[in-house]
Amino acid sequence: MDASEDRFTELYARHHGDVWRYVARRVVGSDVGDVVAEVFLVAWRRLRDVPAESTLPWLYGVARLVLANEARGRRRWRELTLRVAAEPDQSVVADHADEVISQRDVAMAFDQVPEADREVLRLVAWERLTAAEAAVVLGCSRATFAMRLMRARRRLRSRLGVVGVEAGRTPRTAPSMSNWGG
């Protein structure tokens, strides 16, 4: 094996599990393996661009972009499905599964904050990255990431109060945000 193959083999062995968990937290089912494979394909093709000191955050950044491409593809598929379903003599039946499923307040509030906020919170809470590492994933400065994190926490706390009111409960103090990086 040459040096490139050795470096890639070491990179893959060292970070495959972390990348798999990162993707599995964002994708359901068999798509996880496909996304992870695409991440490492990009890493192989751009091996010279992979930073030696922040390899994992770089891989998370690649995974984030691959997931964004996947989401765009799914959105296009849904839009096409809706257009086809809107043809004459066909009707779209609303899916009431969300009304039936009882979710915890935090999960509901988390789902209601913007995707950018959810990703910031995921990087800190789920991936346990430092602000500097998460900034690498998002391609921004550490200060910018810290500001995004502060705003994301604030919006999540705000949504926690609204979710309780919408569910017919009296507003209560927001739960501890210690798992959300602060």
Image (cartoon, grey):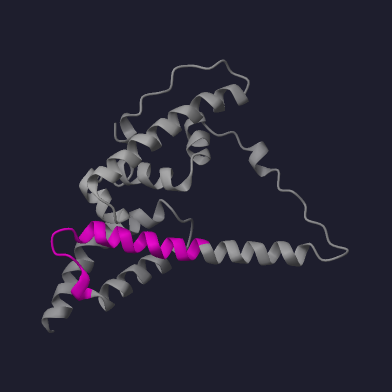
Q: Establish if 1 lies above or below 138.
A: below
Q: Nearer the viewer, residue 161 or 41?
A: 161
Identify the residue at horizontal 40%, vertical 55% (top origin): 24
The answer to whether residue 20 is visible is yes
Q: Residue furthest left?
A: 3
Q: Establish if 101 lies above or below 69.
A: above
Q: Residue furthest right?
A: 89
Identify the residue at horizontal 14%, vertical 76% (top origin): 6
Magenta region's main secondary structure? helix
Q: Residue furthest bottom?
A: 1
Residue 48 location (% of width, % of height): 19, 75
Residue 35 found in image quarter: bottom left
The answer to whether residue 32 is visible is no
Locate the C terminus by quadrant. top left
Identify the residue at horizontal 23%, vertical 68% (top origin): 12
In the displayed structure, does residue 140 sit left or right of residue 93?
left
Residue 65 location (% of width, % of height): 39, 63
Residue 94 location (% of width, % of height): 74, 48
Locate the N terminus by quadrant. bottom left
Identify the residue at horizontal 43%, vertical 47% (top origin): 116
- The residue range painted magenta reads 47-71
